Image (cartoon, rainbow, N blue to C red):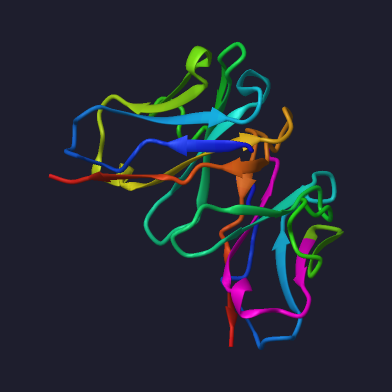
Amino acid sequence: EVQLVQSGAEVKKPGESLKISCKGSGYSFTSYWIGWVRQMPGKGLEWMGIIYPGDSDTRYSPSFQGQVTISADKSISTAYLQWSSLKASDTAMYYCARCSEPIPPYYFDYWGQGTLVTVSS
Amino acid sequence: SYELTQPPSVSVSPGQTARITCSGDALPKQYAYWYQQKPGQAPVLVIYKDSERPSGIPERFSGSSSGTTVTLTISGVQAEDEADYYCQSADSSGTLFGGGTKLTVL
């Protein structure tokens, strides 16, 4: 059974750093792109970027380029999303998801349960 | 910039047919995908490549495409279908989601 299990909820202050994780199991982790999707409170889905754990090839949405870093450690089947300096506007639910095919639009067939990030002073 | 446009809300009575549209200039050349998201849950893929249904998705969910508009159709709507629905398609930077449509089952 394909599973993506994300790390738990986080509460941080503005300016702090953060790295959240997404561990894949039940399939060949290095053979599928993994993507990250943001959902701000009461809002829609936003595609942030994707990574191919096999070689760490990474692509970002222009809206998120330079704002976050996506990485992966294939030895432990885990992808990461990190911030160096959080802002209140980063408060959102973040989902990781597996890309079914390696070409745009990189649609997602399996999703993690989400990680809620709250940034507040 | 390129956008996928969905109606904010659609309402339907149980047993009726719900149609949710998604419009975008590139849709004649790009496949569309649909996700269902219930409150407090992660999205679930319900339609891929315009009209294909993943395993485990009920047959009452179907998709179609005509010109710049794709449509998610839910036949014989049930109370459990009440959710937000999002379309997705490719754009120049990779992928894009529509703004979402809240389906209310009256």
Start-end of magenta stretch: B70-91
Q: Which residue appears at 56% of the width and 14% of the height?
A: A56
Q: Quadrant of residue A6?
A: top left
Above or below, A116 against A6 in this view is: below
Whole-percent x, y for residue B55 in the image: 77, 51
The quadrant the N terminus of chain A occupies is top right
- The residue at the point 37 percent across, 36 percent down is A7
Which of the pair A91/A114 is nearer the observer? A114
Q: Residue A22 at what x, y percent from top left?
A: 46, 31
Q: Position of residue B50 (x, y in %)?
A: 81, 53
Visible in this render: residue A61? no
The percent position of residue B7, horizontal first and vertical second, equals 62, 70
Q: Is residue A20 left or right of residue A13?
A: right
Q: Name the quadrant containing residue B29.
A: top right
In reply to whether residue B85 is colored magenta, the answer given is yes
User: Could you tell me which residue is drawn at 71 percent across and 34 percent down?
Assistant: A104
When asked about the image quadrant of residue B17, the answer is bottom right
Q: Quadrant of the C terminus of chain A?
A: top left
Q: Residue at x 44, y 58 (%)?
A: A43
